[in-house]
Image (spheres, coloured by chain):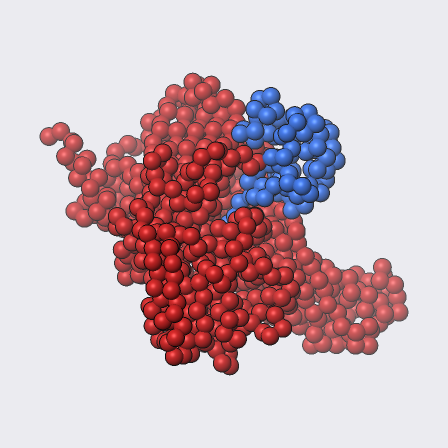
Chain colours: A blue, B red
């Protein structure tokens, strides 16, 4: 199952877990599964049909431009990180 | 002074250049825009002249923090020659919402208030009103006639002052936000708090033999581009507007204007002019929406050009910061734990590069246990914007200086320490993800093998310093089209504003793909109606991503040319091969060159146009290790840079001259940041050095030749192995110089810039505290 890395500031919502393995084939499904395990945590990652503004999803080492639509593999790591900008 | 014993290197060897297998990549053709640039024919924003064009001027706040009570434009509007006056009433008041800008995001309500003050003026130089008139003198006179009644408020001028519980509040609605949208419940100047953790920090520090903790302060510095901001807008009667501007991203400028004015993007065309420098400072819009609204109101095209004072006072510098770093290492020199606390000034509105600062602060190293906290703090200064590896230089100054102190205490060679702890493929960053193939260790090796490192450093008051740095690079979205002309040359149209020679680097990737010469490709940077969406020229992404789009366009052309050859020879496409030298081969030893086939397009099916896009996001991280020799004048505190070498993992150097230029340019900017550059404010929040005479940037007289050492570790996430190269070279210089200063005169510097008076003060303090 994909492994979600819980941001430190949201770990209290996930029972203190640093990582959680959840089912899902897309980022959307992963968030839904996470929210089913820890009700309320999902709204910190998504806003309706999109990732929350200013947030980006990183699958393994790669920033995904597809947001909730991004496919994930059973062995994928899923990270939610603030978007960054360069100069 | 400590003598550091040398140890046998334990780093990987520097790989051989990857470019030898290419025909075009790795060569140094003359840049396509070279003739226009050196003959003065290149057109910049200030060169725009339109029939009936008006000239704009702005009224800017003389106060750093003031509540705007009323604005009276009566006298200004009545001045003969004035065609339009605009204030906050003329711009929509958008709700808070996040506008994705490709790279990062912006709150459109904050952006609107930055373009034109609404309830408050939040920094000196904040635009309060704007005028369009028949000539610039009339416009400026009219701006002076505008009467603004305001209540002056105490300013907040430093990040630590802004975090105090009793600090004046800049934005009444601001609450501290954490990742995922969680907010605090009281007014504050702390816009955001980021935290990253890995492992058990207490456990890690318990294993350390040496633990060093230090605090650092860095000053506000400007990108220092030569060309001031400018915008010319023409609002047509059909509701479409065209904007000519100096920007790092035509599409991002378009989208910002659309968001600010509540317009569909398709009614706005942004024409990117040649750009006289940006370095991150020309991503946000300033004048573009004002020119557009002035044009709408006057019915005439309007041009606005900033003066230098306004550029300094009102456009995005990079933030001043306060950074605490604590690192522990065991006896062998292995890092056991690291902790950082960073607070960056955002300027008047949230959005400092604190988050990348947090993500970069320990990224060069394999840190088993770590914690990083970062704070984005609003202060009464211009809203900060990106500047070359935004946020990373502030952080590296702290980390790399503390590492130097650890090396001294453990008696370990600083290159050995970096090699031993270097992040490698598979290293998990403190913010979570794992690095793919990277070249941090190779940059350390390259410095160790350099003639510079092996040369002696003679003479008194001289020191040698080392520092490393990291920047992410970005991928994002790019588009390109390419059309084969009947003479065999190819016209390339792409959407990336060319700051550092990128159009040639992109053209070379197309040429390599097609097997033709770089000179046979003519690249053009198009406006927003002329090419598909392309994100900003920033994040060191253009050669990677737009180059990839050009590669895809080339592949598209190859497929079509194969089909044309098949038509010509009456065979199937599967029977035709396209060789690396641009010739096509068919059955029975048939052969035709790209140029010969191009002449036959009309009779084999018509024009051939290739299209390519890139949304690939494996840009590969960029690492650099720098080595600097300095000499200190102990009587004045002046630092002279004697020699500078910069090793950098550049992936594949498409055009080595441009890569070297990026490295050298970044180093020079880093030297300026290290030694002289700073915004000097008085107590009222007025910048006292808002000119290039007083804001001291390095010139050619201040820096020696900088030796770039290009380490080519091809990025597996790109067809030609490209990594971004433009940003990371600014990251190590301040720390490398600080470490060299310490070796020269025994003084640790914890504040930037390390200007002569500041260094002299530390030298004298050390002498006064030395017994005897």
* Front residue of B385 and B163: B163
**Image check: B18 left or right of B471?**
right
The residue shown at (79%, 68%) is B591
The residue shown at (51%, 35%) is B183
Q: Return the x and y of residue B341 as percentages of the image width and height.
A: 41, 33
The residue shown at (78%, 65%) is B560
Q: Return the x and y of residue B641 as percentages of the image width and height.
A: 30, 50
Residue B449's place in the image compared with B428, above or below, is below
The residue shown at (31%, 61%) is B691
* Front residue of B673 and A11: A11
Q: Return the x and y of residue B254 as percentages of the image width and height.
A: 57, 61
Residue B674's place in the image compared with B598, above or below, is above
The quarter of the image holding the C terminus of chain B is: top left
Q: Is residue B600 visible?
A: yes
Residue B742's place in the image compared with B711, above or below, is above
Residue B275's place in the image compared with B42, above or below, is above
Instruction: Count every numbered label the image shows and give the total.
Output: 0
Q: Quadrant of residue B460?
A: top left
* Front residue of B114 and B597: B114
């Amino acid at each position: 199952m994909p492994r979600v890395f819980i941001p430190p500031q949201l770990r209290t919502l996930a029972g203190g877990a640093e990582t959680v393995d959840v089912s899902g084939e897309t980022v959307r499904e992963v968030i839904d599964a996470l929210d089913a395990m820890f009700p309320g945590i999902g709204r910190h990652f998504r806003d309706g049909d999109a990732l929350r503004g200013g947030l980006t999803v990183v699958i393994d080492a790669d920033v995904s431009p597809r947001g909730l639509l991004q496919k994930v593999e059973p062995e994928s790591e899923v990270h939610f990180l603030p978007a960054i900008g360069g100069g | 002074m400590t003598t550091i014993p040398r140890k046998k290197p334990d780093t990987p060897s520097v790989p051989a250049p990857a470019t030898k297998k290419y025909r075009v990549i790795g060569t140094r053709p003359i840049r396509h825009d070279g003739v226009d640039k050196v003959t003065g024919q290149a057109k910049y924003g200030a060169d725009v002249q339109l029939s009936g064009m008006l000239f704009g001027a702005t009224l800017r706040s003389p106060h750093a923090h003031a509540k705007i009570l009323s604005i009276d434009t009566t006298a200004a509007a009545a001045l003969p020659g004035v065609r339009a006056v605009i204030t906050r009433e003329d711009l929509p008041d958008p709700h808070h919402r996040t506008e994705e800008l490709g790279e990062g995001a912006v709150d459109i309500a904050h952006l609107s208030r930055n373009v034109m003050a609404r309830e408050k003026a939040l920094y000196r130089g904040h635009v309060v009103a704007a005028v369009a008139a028949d000539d610039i003198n009339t416009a400026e006179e009219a701006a002076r006639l505008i009467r603004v009644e305001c209540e002056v408020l105490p300013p907040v001028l430093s990040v630590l002052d802004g975090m105090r519980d009793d600090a004046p509040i800049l934005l009444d609605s601001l609450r501290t936000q954490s990742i995922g949208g969680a907010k605090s419940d009281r007014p504050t100047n702390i816009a955001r708090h980021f935290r990253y953790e890995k492992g058990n920090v207490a456990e890690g520090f318990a294993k350390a033999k040496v633990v060093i903790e230090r605090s650092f302060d860095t000053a506000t510095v400007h990108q220092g581009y030569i060309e001031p901001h400018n915008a010319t807008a023409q609002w047509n009667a059909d509701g479409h507007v065209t904007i000519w501007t100096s920007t790092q991203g035509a599409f991002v400028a378009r989208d910002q204007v659309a968001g600010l004015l509540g317009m569909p993007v398709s009614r706005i065309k942004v024409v990117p002019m040649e750009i006289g420098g940006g370095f991150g400072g020309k991503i946000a819009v300033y004048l573009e929406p004002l020119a557009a609204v002035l044009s709408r109101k006057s019915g005439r095209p309007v041009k606005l050009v900033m003066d230098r004072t306004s550029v300094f006072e009102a456009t995005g510098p990079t933030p001043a910061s306060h950074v605490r770093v604590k690192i522990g290492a065991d006896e062998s020199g292995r890092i056991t734990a690291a902790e950082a606390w960073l607070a960056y000034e955002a300027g008047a509105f949230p959005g400092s590069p604190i988050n990348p600062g947090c993500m970069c602060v320990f990224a060069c190293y394999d840190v088993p246990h770590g914690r990083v906290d970062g704070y984005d703090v609003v202060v009464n200064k211009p809203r900060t914007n990106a500047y070359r590896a935004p946020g990373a230089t502030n952080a590296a100054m702290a980390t790399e200086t503390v590492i130097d102190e650890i090396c001294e205490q453990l008696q370990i060679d600083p290159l050995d320490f970096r090699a031993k702890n270097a992040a490698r493929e598979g290293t998990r960053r403190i913010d979570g993800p794992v690095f793919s193939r990277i070249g941090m260790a190779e940059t350390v090796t390259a410095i160790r093998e350099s003639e510079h490192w092996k040369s002696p450093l003679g003479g008194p008051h001289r020191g040698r310093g080392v520092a490393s740095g990291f920047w992410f690079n970005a991928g994002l979205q790019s588009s390109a089209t390419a059309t084969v002309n009947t003479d065999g040359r190819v016209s390339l149209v792409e959407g990336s504003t060319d700051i550092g020679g990128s159009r040639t680097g992109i053209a070379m990737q197309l040429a390599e793909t097609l097997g033709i010469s770089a000179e046979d490709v003519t690249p053009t940077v198009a406006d927003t109606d002329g090419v598909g969406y392309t994100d900003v020229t920033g994040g060191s992404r253009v050669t990677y991503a737009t180059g990839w789009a050009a590669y895809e366009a080339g592949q598209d052309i190859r497929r079509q040319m194969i089909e044309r050859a098949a038509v010509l020879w009456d065979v199937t496409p599967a029977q035709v091969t396209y060789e690396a030298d641009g010739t096509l081969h068919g059955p029975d030893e048939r052969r035709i060159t790209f140029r010969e086939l191009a002449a036959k397009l009309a009779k084999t099916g018509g024009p051939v146009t290739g299209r390519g896009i890139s949304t690939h996001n494996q840009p590969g991280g960029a690492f650099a290790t720098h080595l600097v020799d300095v000499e200190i004048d102990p009587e004045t505190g002046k630092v002279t840079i004697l020699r500078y070498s910069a090793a950098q993992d550049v992936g594949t150097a498409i055009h080595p001259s441009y890569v070297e230029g990026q490295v050298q340019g970044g180093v020079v900017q880093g030297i300026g940041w290290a030694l002289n550059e700073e915004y000097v404010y008085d107590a009222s929040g007025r910048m006292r050095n808002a000119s290039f005479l007083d804001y001291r940037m390095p010139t050619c007289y201040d820096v020696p030749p900088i030796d770039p050492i290009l380490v080519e570790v091809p990025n597996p996430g790109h067809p030609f192995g490209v990594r971004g190269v433009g940003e990371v070279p600014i990251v190590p210089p301040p720390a490398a110089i600080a470490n060299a200063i310490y070796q020269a005169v025994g003084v640790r510097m914890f504040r930037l810039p390390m200007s002569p008076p500041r260094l002299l003060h530390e030298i004298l303090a050390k002498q006064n505290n030395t017994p005897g």
